[in-house]
């Protein structure tokens, strides 16, 4: 059982490193957007910080999530 926990933690750590790599490869606006999203900022807060509309925030987050999902599927 302890061995499984270690394997799960190692797998999770590997996935987090991949996520960080994928996010680092985004353009500056999308990178900032995802980092704010991961900090659990609300869409209206993100919109105000980045100077874009709340609708644009939601649209971009959805598109980036799809892109990141595809990246994970391709490994």
Image (spheres, rainbow, N blue to C red):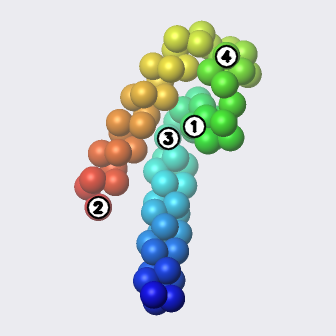
The answer for how far apart the CA atoms under marks 4 and 1 are is 14 Å
| Circles 1, 2 touching at the beta carbon (< 8 Å) | no
- Rendering coords of residue 5 (x, y %): 49, 80
Q: Residue at x 34, y 54 (%)?
A: 72
Residue 61 sits above or below residue 69 on the image: above
The answer for how far apart the CA atoms under marks 3 and 1 are is 9 Å
Nearest to N terminus: mark 3 or mark 4: 3
Residue 54 disc label: none
- Camera-near label (4 vs 1) is 4
| Circles 3, 1 touching at the beta carbon (< 8 Å) | yes
Q: Quadrant of residue 35?
A: top right
Residue that numbered label 4 is attached to: 44
Residue that numbered label 1 is attached to: 34
Side of 7 relative to 43 (left or right): left
Quick one: label 4, few (<14), some, or many (20+) residues within 10 Å? some
Nearest to N terminus: mark 3 or mark 2: 3
Residue that numbered label 3 is attached to: 26
Residue that numbered label 2 is attached to: 75
Q: Residue at x 42, y 37 (%)?
A: 65
- Rendering coords of residue 1 (x, y %): 45, 87
């Amino acid at each position: 059982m302890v061995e499984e926990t270690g394997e799960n933690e190692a797998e999770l750590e590997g996935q987090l490193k991949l996520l960080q790599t994928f996010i680092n490869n985004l353009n500056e606006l999308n990178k900032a957007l995802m980092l704010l999203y991961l900090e659990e900022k609300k869409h209206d807060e993100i919109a105000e910080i980045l100077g874009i509309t709340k609708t644009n925030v939601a649209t971009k987050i959805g598109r980036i999530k799809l892109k990141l999902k595809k990246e994970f599927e391709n490994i």
